[in-house]
Structure formats: structure tokens, C-alpha cells
Amino acid sequence: MARSSAGPEIERLIQLLGRLPGLGPRSARRAALHLVKKRDQLLGPLAEAMAAAHANILTCTTCGNVDTTDPCGICRDARRDPGIIVVVADVADLWALERSAAINARYHVLGGILSALDGVRPENLNLDSLIDRAASGDVKELILALSATVDGQTTAHYITDRLSHLPVKVTRLAHGVPVGGELDYLDDSTLSAAIRQRTGL
Amino acid sequence: MARSSAGPEIERLIQLLGRLPGLGPRSARRAALHLVKKRDQLLGPLAEAMAAAHANILTCTTCGNVDTTDPCGICRDARRDPGIIVVVADVADLWALERSAAINARYHVLGGILSALDGVRPENLNLDSLIDRAASGDVKELILALSATVDGQTTAHYITDRLSHLPVKVTRLAHGVPVGGELDYLDDSTLSAAIRQRTGL
């Protein structure tokens, strides 16, 4: 039997680090050793940053974003168009859209997408609060920024149906050739969509 | 310019996580989001484990291992043979040997290996304390468990030279076919070493 040489503190650190996405048991061990070696430069600051995040981070009850305030900074930002809500599956998608600075609107994080296979049903998502927000009167347009997968499209159709009685325009992201993408490597559906939705120059 | 949507707490977490080996900027972002989502199950415990490790982990002044005590648990373990010291480059190597449970001896962590290219000179390693330990009279054998690379072998030769005046046997790990390894994929030097050092059945 393998003996534990690292002591319970380090073993616990390895075990918890191994639960992070992207770190397996071996890389968790390597990360723990790196932390222990850089005790003052990295382990201490990271422990503090995590404690601060744990103490202060909230989920915005309006949109589902994570921030230190509720409502979150985006929901409180008066410079953002309150008439447009960008619907995303996950906070990661919200971050990606914010990084792109593509739109200056509000968001709504569903917390997943409908999936028959994974057993994700409408009641598991933040859908009721989305309908409430859409019905509030301020909202003119809902942009469904969901993945172009079967589940993403199912979710989009479901939301469109639920909103059909409201005077809100529902749009989705354009399909097409990714900027910088080579035609040769693109699948047929994307190419077909790009041809169908071609734009004038 | 990309806007920061994640708030300073999360940005700091992402930045510090990105300094772990095996996590790039993108996977650090993913890990931070995972932590923020699992605030109570993972972020809180990990913050505590890190704070505990930061407060309690020491480097053993005898052997260079990391533990919560100095001397470390291995150096204090009376059941271990004090006559054999296994010399390793890094604490990770010590952990690997302990996991294999191959030997029940003491260790000495050099903190690196000599490298002309990386500018690692003898004074940068825990070599003086190794010579002191070897000269203490208790030690009968020094096993150099160093990588079979040019730098590892240079370090082994250097240590052997420094110890030549002492009545201490210096050995190194056997070269050969890794257990479970396929001959077809092995390099010529390993195969030659395995043939030269063949053993009777």
C-alpha cells in the first residue's frame, strides 16, 4: 500500500484541487506542490482571494450573474440598455460576451439548457424569472445567445413559445463562418447557413 | 477593449489560479467559475485548506521535505533505516518514491539538479547539508535517485566526487525496461542498458 508522505494538510489540498475542472489527480498533486513551494508568493494570496470570494460573491437574483452585489454590477449599470436582455446558458457565456464588448445590454443566465438526455427540464432553469422580466414592459428585445446545438435550439424554441403572448422581439445569434475560420474546415450546416444568410458588401 | 464583468474578487482569483502549473488563462477562468458556482462545497473548503497549509507547512531543515513539523515526519520516523539516504531532486520525486513504498529510508531533497544551461550551480542546491549528513557517521549508503538525463548524471558525478573521502557507499537507480513498457517503444540507450545489466532468472 502506498504510504502518505505529504501529511494531511497537503493531501486535503491535493484532493480539493483535483475537483477543479482541468486538473486530474496527477496535476492536482503538481499544483499542490507548486503552491507549497511558493507559500508566500502564491499559496497565501490564493487562500485569501478564495476566502474573500467565498465571503463576498453572490448570485444576482435578477439575472443570475455572479458578483459581489445583488443586483449585480451589470443590472445596476444605468448606461446599459434596459430594453435588451441577452439570454445565456451559463455565466461563462456572459463573461465571453462581455469580453467581446459586442453589446451593452443586460443579461439573463439560465443556468443550463434544456436537455432530455441530461434530464434538465424547464423547472430546473431560471425561466420563470426570465418570463417575468420580459413581461415587465421595459424589455423590447430578447437575444437568445445559446449554443447552436440541438439542446440549445430546443431551449430557444421553448423560450420563444413561452413569450409568444408578449410584445417582445426574440432574436438569436447569426450563424456563419467564424471570423478567422477557414472554409475548408467548416461543416456543411455552417456553410449552408452562411450562404443562406449572405450579406451585401 | 474588453470590459471586466467578473468583479475584482473573481478577476484576482482567475489571475492567481492562472499561475498554477497546468492551468492557462482560459482554464483558470473555467476553474474560477466552477469555484464560484460551488461556493459552499468547494470554494470555502479549498480556501480553508489553503490557509491551513499556508499557516502550517514548513520545509524540513534536515532533508528539505515539506511537512507540518520540522524535522519532518520521515526524519522523525524511528522505523526508517537511518543508514540509507535517498537523494532526490525535488519533493515530487520523494512523494513518488513514497507512493511506490519501494524503500523505507530517509531522504534528502536537493531542490533541483545542476544545470549549466539553467545556471543552477552547486551553491544553489542543498548539497552542503547532504555532505554534512553523509559525514555524520550514521549513514552507510546514499542512493542517488536522480533523473537519467545529462544534468541528473552530472549532479550524480558531482555528489560522488564530493563524497569520495567518506566511507559511504554511493549507488544509483538501475536503468532498464520500465515495468509494463513495450520494447518496441523504448529508446536505444535504455535497451542497451537493459541488455548490459541483464539479470538471471
Image: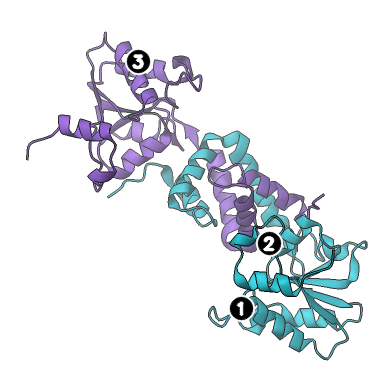
Chain colours: A cyan, B purple
Residue farthest left in this picture: B201
Q: Find residue A120 and report its horizontal and vertical position in percent.
A: 59, 80
Q: CA distance from mark 1 to mark 3?
A: 64 Å
- Disc 1 sits on a residue from what chain? A
The amino acid on which the numbered mark 2 sits, given as a three-letter code, is Ala
Which type of secondary structure does the marked residue at label 3 adopt? helix
Question: Are labels 1 and 3 assigned to the same chain?
Answer: no
Q: Are marks 1 and 2 on the same chain?
A: yes
**Disc 1 + disc 2, Cβ < 8 Å:** no
* Label 3: chain letter: B
Residue A144 at x, y = what percent? Answer: 75, 74
The foreground one among B30 and B129 is: B30
Along the line of sight, which residue is nearer the eye, A111 or A166? A166
| Residue at the (62%, 56%) spot, across then down | B30
Q: Residue lying furthest top in this view?
A: B165
User: Which label lies toward us, 1 or 2?
Assistant: 1
Q: Within 10 angstroms of label 1, few (less than 14), some, or many (20 or more) residues?
A: few
Q: Position of residue B153 (x, y in %)?
A: 33, 23
Name the mark on residue B158: 3
User: According to the image, label 2 marks what residue?
Assistant: A92
Q: Secondary structure at mark 2?
A: helix
Residue underneath mark 1: A150
Q: What is the spatial separation of the Cα atoms under label 2 and label 3, in whole angstroms?
A: 52 Å
What's the residue type where badge 3 is placed? Tyr
Label at residue A75: none
Front-lying residue, B3 or A15: B3
